[in-house]
Image (cartoon, rainbow, N blue to C red):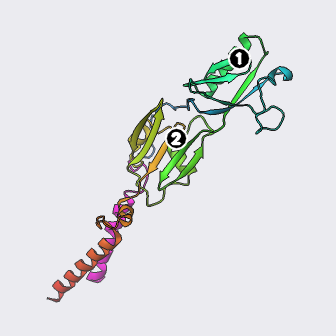
């Protein structure tokens, strides 16, 4: 191997190692070692959330009062759409306002069921609630809105559904903006460190979370003509050329 080849190989290897350390997820995870995860955080309802609520019972005529057809179902009263209002309630026929804010959909379903039983309106009711329009958002190196259909959605699951991060994404400094009761809180989390990720308050996503994926330094510099060229491809190419030239001059002497 010539001196020029050796130097070029070392430069390329160094650059490759530096970049790979920023790409691999959960780098400090220990194989065959069990971890205690935080308790799963279920989606809790907020004002503005839309819900599909269907009540089942043997008495079809009575449940039809609650299963209002909104024009998006099958035409048989099998799709009732309710919106959590600014006070945190949904307004249901006969039952009136029902508290929804802060509850999981299962807790809300149980409350509606008990209200029906207490009022003796329907015997043996079954209440089924589905999320109608809940989602989270990606900005930056990933973009788009993705719907929430399950009670628990982790950040890793969300990234998988979005098609994973491109190589140009900074995995060390993910920003999640969460708004609760009119207050927005920013959270930072690294995808490279197991404990930091799994213990983060935003490991389990909530509706309307905004996940910003910033670009790596190389892409930032490429986008900014006045930015530093350090760590860019052209910088390392120039550096390698200079080192090779100096080595060759030294060898000739």
Task: Classify mark 1: residues with Cα within 10 Å, few (<14), some (14-19) or many (20+).
Answer: few
Please tell me whether residue 15 belongs to the stretch shown in magenta.
yes
Q: Residue at x 26, y 81 (%)?
A: 3
Would residue 14 appear left or right of 204 to someone viewing this image?
left
Q: Residue at x 73, y 21 (%)?
A: 93
Where does the magenta region start and end? 1-28
Residue at the left extreme, as displayed? 253
Between 25 and 83, the one lying in front of the other is: 83
Q: Residue at x 64, y 34 (%)?
A: 50
Q: Are marks 1 and 2 in contact (CB under 8 Å)?
A: no
Task: Classify mark 2: residues with Cα within 10 Å, few (<14), some (14-19) or many (20+).
Answer: some
Q: Write down the quadrant of residue 36 in the picture.
A: top left
Q: Is residue 135 visible?
A: yes
Q: Is residue 172 above or below residue 103?
A: below
Would residue 232 appear left or right of 49 to someone viewing this image?
left
| Chief secondary structure of the magenta portion | helix
Please name the residue that numbered disc 2 is placed on.
154
For discs 1 and 2, the disc positioned in front in the rendered view: 1
Q: Position of residue 41 (x, y in %)?
A: 51, 32
Residue at the bottom extreme, as displayed? 252
Compare marks 1 and 2 and give the one earlier in the sequence.
Answer: 1
Would residue 74 appear left or right of 52 to someone viewing this image?
right
Q: Position of residue 147 (x, y in %)?
A: 61, 43
Looking at the rendered structure, which numbered label has been put on residue 95? 1
Q: Write down the quadrant of residue 131 in the picture.
A: top right
Between 135 and 192, the one lying in front of the other is: 135
Specify the quadrant that holds the C terminus: bottom left
Q: Position of residue 179 (x, y in %)?
A: 47, 35
Q: CA distance from mark 1 to mark 2?
A: 35 Å
Would residue 107 appear left or right of 120 to someone viewing this image?
left
Specify the quadrant that holds the N terminus: bottom left
Please tell me whether residue 33 belongs to the stretch shown in magenta.
no
């Amino acid at each position: 191997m010539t001196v020029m080849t050796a130097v070029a190989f070392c430069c390329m290897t160094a650059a490759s190692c530096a970049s790979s350390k920023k790409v691999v997820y959960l780098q400090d995870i220990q194989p065959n070692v069990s971890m205690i995860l935080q308790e799963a955080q279920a989606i809790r309802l907020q004002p503005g959330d839309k819900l599909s609520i269907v009540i089942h019972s043997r008495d079809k005529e009575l449940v039809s009062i609650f299963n209002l057809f909104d024009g998006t179902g099958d035409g048989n009263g099998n799709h009732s759409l309710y919106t959590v209002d600014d006070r945190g309630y949904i307004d249901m026929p006969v039952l009136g306002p029902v508290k929804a804010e802060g509850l999981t959909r299962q807790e809300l379903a149980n409350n509606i069921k008990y209200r029906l039983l207490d009022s003796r309106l329907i015997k043996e009711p079954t209440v089924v609630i589905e999320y109608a329009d809940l989602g989270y958002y990606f900005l930056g190196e990933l973009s788009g809105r993705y719907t929430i259909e399950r009670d628990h959605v982790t950040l890793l699951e969300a990234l998988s559904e979005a098609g994973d991060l491109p190589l140009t994404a900074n995995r060390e400094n993910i920003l999640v903006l969460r708004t609760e009761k009119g207050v927005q809180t920013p959270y930072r989390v690294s995808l490279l460190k197991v404990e930091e990720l799994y213990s983060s308050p935003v490991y389990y996503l909530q509706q309307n979370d905004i996940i910003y994926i910033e670009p790596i330094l190389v892409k930032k510099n490429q986008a900014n003509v006045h930015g530093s060229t350090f760590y860019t491809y052209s910088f390392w190419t120039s550096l390698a050329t200079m080192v090779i030239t100096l080595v060759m001059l030294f060898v000739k002497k």
